[in-house]
Amino acid sequence: MVITLVILAVAAALFIQGKIRADLVGMSALIALLLFGVLTPQEALSGFSSTITMMMVGVFIVGGAVSRTGLAKKISARILALAGTSETKLFILIMVVTSTIGAFVSNTGTVAIMMPVVISLAAGAGSSPSRFLMPLAFASTMGGMLTLIGTTPNMIISGALEGAGYGPLRFFSFLPVGVICVVVGTAFLLFASKWLVKKEEEGAGSGSAGGRTLAELADQYRLKQEERRARILPGSPLAGKTVRELKILRALQVSILDIRRRKKHPRLFESPIEQLMPEPGSVLLEKDTFSFVMPEEHVRKFAEDCKLELLDESDPLSSPEHKYTFEGFGIAELVILSASRLVDRRIRDAELRENYGLRVLGLRRKNETILQTIADIKIQAGDALLVQGRWKDLSRLEKEHTEWVLVGKPQEAASRETLDYKAPLTAIIVVLMIASMTFNILAPVTAVMLAALALIFTGCFRNAEEAYKTISWQSVVLIASMLPAAIALEKTGAAALASKGLIESVGSYGPYALLATIYAVTSVVTLFVSNTAAGALCTPVALQAAVNMGLSPYPFLFAVATAASMSLAFPFSTPPNVLVMAPGRYAFMDYVKVGAPLQILFGVIMVFALPLLWPFAN
């Protein structure tokens, strides 16, 4: 027992520290339990053959098809359009639509689908995106409580109940709990989300045509404040040279944003100004003007050495109506996902120019914006990159769902998105999957795996490799390695000892006190470890405590599933919280200020609601 507790305590500490990948920590703990003889090889590997693990694989594929065929985005955009310009209606619809998608798609995938749509609609309503993005992340998490496949802890407690002889839960067994979470969360956040809007952001979306404009995006990255414009004078060493040949640009850390020159013979009604994207082969000519960003202390030296005339707003080519009105190219924002291949790579090594024809202009991390000397910065999950490229290249970015989320795109480009022809077929397969589970025609794992195969065979993915890419293998390995931990806790008597301690400390105060304690402990644990780990560790203890007191395990295990999933108080507790941090310009305390009261409110309500839904009596 001591060995088991030590191994799991070390694993929990490593989960909290976060320096080692969660799946590697889980596998290391599993191997340690195997080496010390706590588990047999069959028991240690049982997690990889578990119905929970296989169902999780199928859920990722189904969710990937819903996302990749454009089904979820198209449906959400049409429903959200019902809100018009009413901020309250828009908020409620965002919460309802996001939580509904979250019932069938992973919370990370849900946020990836909804974030660009929400940012565009917020701007159209004249509102700040920060009012909606944190509630969006929370809604994706709350929606996971609506169905059996919505979140991993739901599947864990279903497996535990089946293993204890109570039978598995049905697809919509979680619906009452999920509805409570969505209703309470929406009502609370409708008012609390107003705290998230910074004074300087109020009205930021006013005047937009339904999407964040290029000027607004440039303003968020301080391009307006730090951009300078210069004209190339006769005799300048820059004249006649390509951008690639100018070593001084690299030496002085100059980032050119665009090149403008007057056309020799403009056509009738045509703009007399030609705008060029600064590519390595672009040639600079006398009388060209170009905008650039560089350290302020180098500006005068750069202008003097290169015979440049620094321009101000009075110059026709520097006037606001000419700024950011890119022709054929533009800027957009990428939020890096945790599974992206760019994580831990320097920006100069990211090969975005080679693979996508893009230049990285700036980076936002938490509340810090960096525009200069960014080439050697290592990219982290949740970072937002401001990139520049041709619209045809920027549109390709949306296909890389596992790498990043594309946000900040103008409405003009967004309007060109169309529904893929496989979306109706995807909808039919998903509906059949849900129906088969709802009416108990097929076992949940059978229904999910059959749906996943059907989506692959019917061409809802280009090939099987694309389907495999939608699976978060880190999550799969984590849950497969943590499920045997429950066997170890039960086998060594550690679960019985923990449940005995719970009963002795709070059992005399009645079942409500025990339920509240289990919920509180799980809620605290899930702030520091993944919901998978929290569910796997707390489920056997809660089950044993309920059985020892002669009570029904249902309210206690539902408390574990709910508490493990509703991790809202810290930004790094769940991937959705991290994803919206940079685009929403949130600080750490914003999550504490809004998420912590909501997490506590859920706990109080569930302690009284769960026994009404599933009585304590066996």
Image (spheres, grey):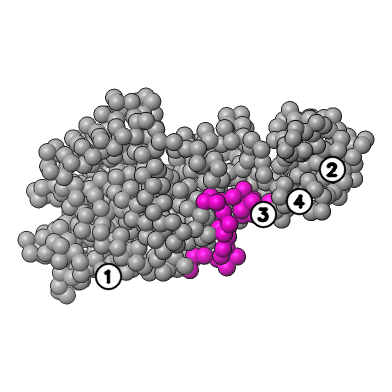
Tag 2–tag 1 contact (CB < 8 Å): no
The answer to which of marks 2 and 1 sits earlier in the sequence is: 2
Q: From which residue to which does the magenta span run?
A: 195-223
Identified at 19% across, 64% down, the residue is 610
Q: Position of residue 415 (x, y in %)?
A: 50, 41
The answer to which of marks 4 and 2 sits earlier in the sequence is: 2
Between marks 4 and 2 in the image, the one whose residue lies nearer the viewer: 4
User: Cα distance, mark 2 to mark 1?
Assistant: 65 Å
Q: Note whether 89 is above or below 334 in the view shown.
A: below
Q: Please, what secondary structure does the residue beneath circle 3 have?
A: loop
Q: Which residue is mark 4?
A: 319
- Residue 306 appears in the picture as rendered: no
Q: Quadrant of residue 434?
A: top left
Tag 4–tag 2 contact (CB < 8 Å): no
User: Cα distance, mark 2 to mark 3?
Assistant: 22 Å
Q: Which residue is mark 2?
A: 231
Tag 1–tag 4 contact (CB < 8 Å): no
Three-letter residue code for mark 3:
Arg
Q: Position of residue 240 (x, y in %)?
A: 84, 29
